[in-house]
Image: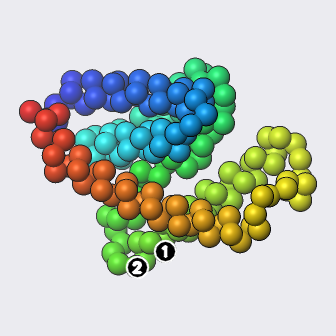
Amino acid sequence: MYGTRKIALGGILSALVVILLYLAAVLHTSRLFLLSLCSFAVSVVIIEGGLATGLMFYGATSILAFLLVPDKTMPILYISFFGIYGFAKALIEKHITGIFQYILKFIFFNICFFVIYLSAGLIISISMSEIKLPLPLWIIITALQTAFLFYDRVFTIVISYYCNRFRKIIIS
């Protein structure tokens, strides 16, 4: 891909990510869907420009989102998981095969979830023992693991579709 096209694609996708994060902050539905679209955009930049370009894109969109999005919850989720998952997925799938891919992906997800969980307590200044969960913690964790497995599968399908069909349109 030519340099000017990479820059244009990065600019368009940056604007799209910030708009999606803004919508996720102001709308009370489809937040996870919008955050997922943001993570797909990061992966497209990684595919087209490499990890270094993807890192610059991630940094720029993170800063812009923090500056422009009124509710900081969505930029925090983007920064702490949805934005960086494309990097983790790319590196894991490039270097590791088989069941170990899923093991590392689950480890990555659980670390991110743990950081988000602890950060939430610090941000709202309460102890984790004071939080009343609607279900037992083991059910919530199991549901999150299942949702992550679904998310990873959909992520793979979307990126494969991009590489096999949509990328040809952008490049030509």
Image quarter hosting the N terminus: top left
Q: Is residue 39 above or below residue 65?
A: below
Q: Residue at x 36, y 72 (%)?
A: 96
Q: CA distance from mark 2 to mark 1?
A: 6 Å
- Outermost residue to the left: 172
| Residue type marked 2 | Ile
Q: Quadrant of residue 69?
A: top right
Q: Return the residue at label 1.
A: 103
User: Is residue 15 at least partly visible in the picture?
Assistant: yes
Q: Secondary structure at mark 1?
A: helix
Tag 2 near tag 1, CB within 8 Å? yes
Which class describes the residues within 10 Å of circle 2: few (<14), some (14-19), or many (20+)? few
Residue 34: percent from the left, percent from the top?
Answer: 48, 38
Tell me: 158 left or right of 107. left
Camera-nearest residue between 123 and 55: 123
Asked if residue 35 can be seen in this view, the reply is: no
